[in-house]
Image (cartoon, helix red, strand yellow):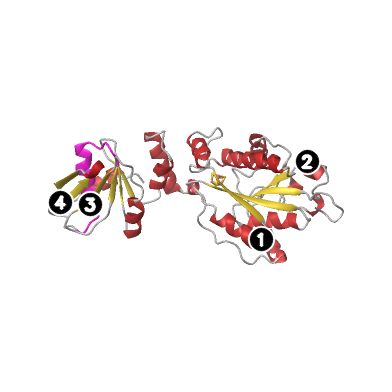
Amino acid sequence: MTPDGKRKTRGIGLMSGGLDSMLAVRVLLEQGIDVLGMTFRTPFFGSARGEAAAALLGISHRVLDITEDHLRMVKDPAHGYGKNMNPCIDCHGMMFKIAGDLMEELEADFLFSGEVLGQRPMSQNMAALRLVEKLSGYPGRILRPLSARLLPETEPEREGLVDRSALLDIQGRSRRRQMELAERFGIREFPSPGGGCLLTDPGFSARLRELLDRKPLADALDIERLKVGRHFRLSGGSKVVVGRHQSDNEVIEGLFRPEDLVVKVVDFPGPVSLLEGGAAEDDRRVAASITARYSKAPREVDCQVRIVGPGGSEQVVDVRPAADALLEELRID
Ligand code: SF4
């Protein structure tokens, strides 16, 4: 409540945790607006930076896991992908739609983000910002405080809930104005970059594209598997994921389905490999040979590889470590 008993204006902001979203929050706090931050979590991006940024700013904050709906959208985005597998238009539309539903539930007044006009040519141009608003179902209620004076007036500005003259007119890719603003607000600490959206990563996107072509019903566990190891598609159609180092091996051990097979060299140190369940005999042998190639077993002679399947069923095969040409041919990324 304000001192004269009126309800404070309330905005709900998408918080990636980057500097721009922090600045957008600060611009609104300066106007005495009550701010709630919202960060989403999926297998493609986490919420840690958003949570850290909200803590630094001392604002209320919510985290929402949207894995199921988001993955469904990523498989078939109505407005296509960006440079990689990033469906930014539909993704932003979805996030604002969810935040908008919360806005209605909490009787908040508007939504906002730290987006800057022209910073990302594909997803932050005027047409894209308008399209995202339309998709969200809340046209006119999405404020971009850092670029607001370059954009059409929004409802909260028209209603006098937000002072347009105290909003900004930043555009383009330069970070100069943001750095000046951070200095003015005394924001010297912000969550370190990194841990961004995997959908913008070319290597990850190549793996994801291949997965969705092969397995349209891929689920969150399939996505988690894309984050670790070396991936090979075998001629019978099965996939084998081979650990690159100890920490990969540990992660891979937590990603098995009951029907999957564990592949490991018997007498030499080496990786843990995950072979998808139902692999034919030929694929099993090739998976064993690839696993042997990344072990300490000598390359010129056969070695024994153990394949353990559902219910502990076990098979030991003698194979020669795979030749580089075969690895090259079967490797997914
Ligand atoms: S970069 Fe990733 S999280 Fe951000 S809008 Fe695009 S798809 Fe969504």
Helix, strand or loop at label 2? It is helix
Q: Amino acid at mark 3?
A: Lys
Q: Which residue occupies the extreme right position in the image?
A: 4
The residue nearer to you, when weighing 140 against 29, is 29
Instruction: Name the residue that disc number 4 marks.
Output: 304
Q: Give how far across and how far down residue 232 sits, in percent.
A: 30, 44
Tell us which disc is closer to us: 2 or 3: 3
Q: Which mark is residue 129?
A: none
Can residue 279 be found in the magenta stretch?
yes
Helix, strand or loop at label 1? It is helix
Instruction: Name the residue that disc number 1 marks.
Output: 57
Instruction: Name the residue that disc number 2 marks.
Output: 155
Q: Amino acid at mark 4?
A: Gln
- Distance in Å between CA atoms under marks 2 and 4: 70 Å
User: Which residue corresponds to the image point at 50% horizontal and 42% vertical from the top-left?
Assistant: 67
Image quadrant where residue 130 sits: top right
Quarter of the render that holds ligand 1 = top right
Tell us which disc is closer to us: 1 or 2: 1
Q: Is mark 1 within 8 Å of ligand 1?
A: no
Q: Residues within 10 Å of mark 2 (few under 14, many from 20)?
A: some
Q: Is residue 107 left or right of residue 124?
A: right
Q: In the rendered image, is residue 131 in sight? A: yes
- Point out the tag, 2 or 4, that comes first from the N-terminus: 2
- Point out the tag, 2 or 3, that comes first from the N-terminus: 2
Q: Give how far across and how far down residue 166 sits, in percent.
A: 79, 54
Q: Is residue 310 left or right of residue 221?
A: left
Q: State if disc 3 and disc 2 touch (CB < 8 Å).
A: no
The residue nearer to you, when weighing 33 against 214, is 33
Q: Residues within 10 Å of mark 1 (few under 14, many from 20)?
A: some
The stretch in magenta equals 276-296
User: Which residue corresponds to the image point at 53% horizontal and 40% vertical from the top-left?
Assistant: 87
Q: State if disc 4 and disc 2 touch (CB < 8 Å).
A: no
